[in-house]
Image (cartoon, rainbow, N blue to C red):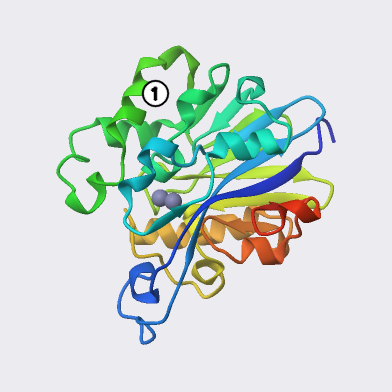
């Protein structure tokens, strides 16, 4: 085995109250039950590499979603863990929904890694017309990525970002949704991001309400299970339970940051 083992963290920057009926595709008998959503970015660090996975929502965009309780800029949370934005070598963008791209511009020395299919979709002829999706992208964030083309690495399918950390096209939630696999001391962790918002999506085979392709979403569930070193090594994208399944790096971070491995 060559390359590094990473430490992986989930950092929660916001929270929203919701109902089950908003979060699962199709009718849900328990639609009116409370079903809160957490908003995260993820950090993978080794001796040699610092990789941030997704960029959250910027403070000035936080009012965009009604009812969002914004705790801190993702950049501030990283600084709390001792990581300066300027020191980040790679920012993996799992997909281009606004709650995953907001602070991307702050990582001024980073290479952005995203799937070609994702950028092509949002800059192509269809996205503007698909009303159920077009509100989900932030035009300023998209313009930033298009203006920084020499710092954007577009990948097709599976690709290594650095040794021990790879991205994998799964689609489903968006046209070019990718998940991230990270080698850690506990085995391979998969950061599912919005390929599985909640553990219930993956574990009960229940698609999330917002999706680009239904078959793609089921395929993503299978691929996540294939890539992970075990069922306890999957990190759901928006599930408050991440902060219960995994411990904080130290007590002051409880309820905000989890150490995955
Ligand atoms: Zn999304
Ligand atoms: Zn999301």
Image coordinates of residue 201 in percent, x first then y, are 49, 68
> In this rendering, would 167 be left or right of 48?
left
Task: Write the residue at 30% across / 75% down.
Answer: 26
Of 56 and 232, the residue lying toward us? 56
Mark 1 crowdedness (10 Å alpha carbons): few <14, some 14-19, many ≥20: some
Q: Residue shown at 58%/56% (left/top)?
A: 224
Q: Is residue 222 left or right of residue 1?
A: left
Q: How many marks?
A: 1
Q: Residue furthest left?
A: 129
Q: Can residue 155 be seen in the rendering of this structure?
A: no
Quick check: 14 above or below 142?
A: below
Give the image location of residue 129, x and y in percent: 14, 43
Instruction: Establish if 45 lies above or below 260.
Output: above
Residue at point 52% right, 65% down? Answer: 198
Whether residue 32 appears in this view of the structure is: yes
Residue 211 placed where, x, y %? 34, 57
Query: Is ligand 1 closer than 8 angstroms to the Cβ of mark 1?
Result: no
Rendered view: 174 above or below 156? below
Quadrant into which the N terminus falls: top right
Which residue is at the front of the view, 145 or 104?
104
Left/right placement of residue 165 relative to residue 112 reads right
Task: Compare residues 209 and 81 and report the one nearer the observer.
Answer: 81
Q: Which residue is mark 1?
A: 145
> Mark 1 falls on what kind of element?
helix
Quarter of the view holding residue 20:
bottom left
Establish if 39 lies above or below 44. below
Q: Which picture quadrant has residue 41? A: top right
Instruction: Please identify the residue farthest to the bottom as the structure is shown.
Output: 29
Tell me what residue is drawn at x 43 percent, y 77 percent.
34
Foreground pick, 164 / 11: 11
Which quarter of the picture shows residue 67? bottom left
Q: Position of residue 144 (x, y in %)?
A: 37, 22
């Amino acid at each position: 085995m060559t390359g590094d083992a990473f430490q992986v963290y989930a950092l929660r920057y916001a929270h929203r109250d919701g109902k089950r009926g908003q979060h699962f595709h199709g009718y849900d008998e328990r639609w009116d039950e409370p079903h809160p959503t957490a908003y995260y970015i993820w950090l993978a660090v080794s001796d040699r590499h610092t990789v941030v996975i997704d960029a959250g929502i910027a403070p000035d965009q936080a009012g965009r979603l009604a009812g969002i309780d914004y705790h801190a800029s993702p950049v501030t949370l990283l600084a709390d863990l001792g990581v300066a934005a300027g020191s980040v070598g790679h920012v993996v963008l799992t997909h281009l929904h606004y709650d995953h791209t907001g602070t991307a511009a702050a990582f001024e020395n980073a290479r952005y890694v995203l799937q070609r299919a994702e950028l092509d979709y949002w800059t192509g002829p269809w996205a503007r017309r698909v009303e159920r999706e077009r509100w989900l992208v932030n035009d300023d964030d998209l313009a930033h990525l298009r203006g920084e083309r020499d710092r954007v690495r577009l990948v097709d399918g599976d690709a290594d970002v650095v040794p021990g950390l790879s991205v994998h096209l799964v689609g489903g939630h968006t046209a070019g949704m990718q998940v991230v696999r990270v080698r850690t001391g506990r085995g391979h962790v998969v950061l599912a991001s919005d390929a599985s918002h909640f553990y219930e999506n993956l574990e009960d085979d229940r698609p999330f309400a917002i999706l680009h392709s239904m078959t793609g979403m089921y395929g993503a569930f299978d691929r996540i299970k294939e890539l992970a070193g075990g069922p306890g090594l999957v990190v759901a994208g928006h599930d408050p339970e991440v902060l219960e399944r995994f411990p904080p790096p130290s007590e002051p971070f409880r309820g905000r940051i989890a150490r995955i491995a």
